Image (cartoon, rainbow, N blue to C red):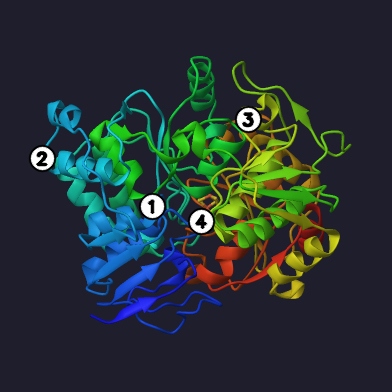
Amino acid sequence: MEILKTSQPISWLDGVDLNGNVIQKDHELNGQNIAGKELHIPGSIGSTVGSYKIYSLAKRGFAPKKIIIENKDDAITIWGAIFGKIPFEISGWKPQKVDIDKIEKLNLSEEIKEKLVKIAELYETDEFIETKNLPKQISGVSYKTITDAGLNLIEDLAEDFRVNQLSMLNPAGMDLTRWREQRVPKDFAEKQIRIIKAYEKMGAMITCTCTPYHLPRIYSLISRLKSFGNVNLHWAESSAVVYANSVLGLRTNREGLSALFYAIAGFAPVYGLHLDENRNPNIKIKVEANLKTINDFATFGYWLGEKIKDKIPYISGIKKSSPSLNFRSLYHGIAEIPFLERLKALGAAGAASGSLALFHVEGITPEAVRKSIFLDRIEDTLFFEEIDLKSTKEKLNTGEEKDVDLVAFGCPHSSLDEIKTISKYLFGKKIRDGVDLWVCTSRDVKMQADNLGYTLTIEDAGGKVFCDTCMIVAPIEDIGYKTTATNSAKAAYYLTRFCKQKVVYGDVKEIIKLVVK
Ligand code: F3S
């Protein structure tokens, strides 16, 4: 069997096409085909939907024959291989026999038990937690990201399995009620509706958002759970994972297909970022640039992910006293967290350009404030300076302002505060002809924005507040858009790699100024 080795992580969603060709920009395997080979990788970066891509490759006959992974915690690759029935090994690692008595006693089907045993042996754990009362976040909802193979998998699973309560969905490929206004092609819409129906049949909550923590019912549930101690969750959706771990002080690994599996099984192993000893930082970052806007924080996150990949950073130099930062007290049980949207943008970008799953900010994030982490494992220090901020912004700008035909905000899905800011800048203005403006959010948040009049202001100016979807997982390239303006570094990353777009990247205020008459 031909061996293909790389020291660079693979971004499965956008770095490998459906025929097994590596198309990842600047990757040493770019131009090679992985089908039928023994593929050696350190691990994966980017979207948690990568598991579905591996499964799709297996279904189409273009998967590697075997995968050797260095990073034992790379659940994206491991679960893609498990579902795709691709043999895999963790290099230098022999799965240990564990006491599986507990699993044997569970009232589960043989198929589910077999997968739980495999994962228990891999992570050397016989500790499992019941997932029933914990919110689960399932990715792999948009037809664009999971394609026909994923659709068939979900429909097959829906025939036999049910997920337990509080199983929430990531965004779909379209607004489920306004997709015609988005000009989503009908054949895409039909397949998307089949996916949603299959999840509905399984018993999932059709939340279709990547920011479940903005949903009031989930937020208050998390707050209640937090008052009992550490909360171990199973969330797929890389931006939600890093936000939950870093900002909310919850505990989740970067799950892929595994989140769906644990929602079905009702049990999940405790390992990785669920454990205290794996949450300590191993690199220090000193921020010397002046970060003011959400866009600045997103840019910093992008730089960070590229530099440190899957390390856990301890970030200093972000000042609480900066006048532009907005402090808010949250529900009891979660530390007071300032400027949530800025940290949301930072984490999302770092999880896209690298595989950031947890960061600590000195004096700000819960574990850094409580000093429950140890700093003695820090191996290196990096500096983020004004010049890095400027050059990263330049790198993300690939389009011409005059060519913008879509403005897209809400990656990750907009909070009420973010929608309020957009409506403030659009108040009394009109968007120029030939430009569409999307604000992407969840149904719950849109309802609040409707009640407060923000939606009306945005739609009066010619924009649209869409739910259930976003500019990346909707088929914007098939709708006909060519140049998208966004304030999100995560979106900027995927727009060029996954949506065939040129990107105009900037702050909300700057972008709106560009497109109003
Ligand atoms: Fe969410 Fe879509 Fe961005 S799923 S994080 S808005 S790519």
Residue 275 percent across, percent down from the top left: 46, 33
Res 367 label: 3
C-alpha distance separating marks 1 and 2: 25 Å
The quadrant holding residue 271 is: top left
Identify which amino acid the numbered label 1 is placed on. Lys
Residue 78 percent across, percent down from the top left: 32, 55
C-alpha distance separating marks 4 and 2: 46 Å
Q: Tell me if residue 422 comes above or below residue 33 in the rendering.
A: above
Q: Which of marks 3 and 4 precedes in the sequence?
A: 4
Residue for point 66% across, 38% down: 375
Q: In this view, does 125 lie to the left or right of 295?
A: left
| Residue 252 in sight | yes
Report the mark closest to the observer, 3 or 2: 3
Residue on which disc 2 sits: 110
The quadrant holding residue 506 is: bottom right
Q: Is there a contact, CB below 8 Å, between mark 4 and mark 1?
A: no
Residue on which disc 4 sits: 181
